[in-house]
Amino acid sequence: MIVPSLLFISRIFFADAPEPTPVPLLSVAPQVDGKYEPLWDDCPEVKLERAGFEGPLTLRAAVNGERLFLILRFPCKSPMTKHKPWVWNAAAQRFAVGPEREDSLCLRLLLAERPGAVSCDVWNWGACRLNEGAADDLLQVFSLDSPSHALKSVAPDGTPQYLVTTPDEGLRPWSGNYDVKTLHLNPSRYEPLPPTGSRMDVKCKGEWKDGFWTVEFSRALDTVQIDDLRLVWGSLLQLDVVRTLESPPGPLAFGAERSGLIRLRLPEAPQP
């Protein structure tokens, strides 16, 4: 597990930060099935706008037992559940990668900050590769350094920052379909795969209906994994919602004010 205040030097800025939204403790656990349940009405709604989405998103959070639950809804006129499918190219007489890209979103949970870098615990959902019950669980670091394998990005003030994405320990929830002998039978480029290790910690499911995606996430407050953020009773959880893993850092950029982050106050531990 990772406890930010113990591992890194804190330089988190709170200028003009809104009051945290309280996360209620529910007596019944939500079903992680991509369907909005009436019990979510008892949870305060957070509205936000982010680049890459067709309109404002909403987020609600709750705790039941030892698990955190999140539900997000965002508008989408035409859902895309394919991702780089195999398409037959008659002229070349071979299969090629199609142009479709799945609908997706990522939760970036502020993990910690050290001189020159900000780290995030990332939960990634996709309508094609990551909609069979498990999100992908990763670590992202935005830094002023530029390692050879980093993706160059831009902070809100225009300064360059560099993104390094590292998967958690274990197998991811999907595998590639590259068997050329069967592509005519199954044009999907990706197949679901049971995740293992720390990459099986985050449950998720999305469903599109009536012009909206509803996506639910759930994870244990403490996974006892060294590469996960430990969620402590009564603590402040700060996170952002972005469209893809490659999205710019926004309020999570090194040196940026954190006032643009979603701020959630987890409930106090229930009395025995």
Image (cartoon, helix red, strand yellow):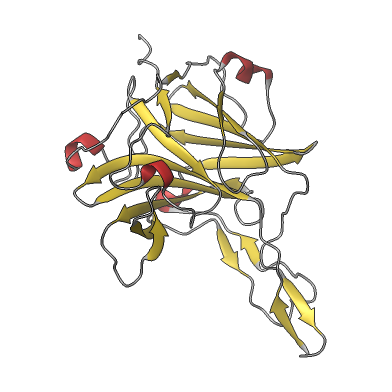
For this orientation, the residue located farthest to the top is 271
Rendered image quadrant of residue 192 = bottom right
Q: Which of 70 and 259 lies nearest the eye of the viewer?
A: 259
Image spot of residue 145 (x, y percent): 26, 62
Image spot of residue 207 (x, y percent): 71, 40
Q: Is residue 137 above or below residue 19?
A: below
Q: Quadrant of the C terminus?
A: top left
Q: Which of 122 and 199 lies nearest the eye of the viewer?
A: 122
- Residue 1 shows in this picture: no
Position of 146 with respect to 212 (left or right) is left
Q: Which of 182 and 117 lies nearest the eye of the viewer?
A: 117
Q: Is residue 39 above or below residue 261?
A: above
Which residue is pictured at 57% across the width and 60% down the height?
174
Q: Quadrant of the N terminus?
A: top left
Rendered image quadrant of residue 5 = top left
Position of 177 with respect to 237 (left or right) is right
Which residue is pictured at 67% across the width and 67% down the height?
84
Image spot of residue 89 (x, y percent): 78, 83
Which residue is pictured at 57% across the width and 65% down the height?
175
For this orientation, the residue located farthest to the front is 157
- Residue 127 shows in this picture: yes
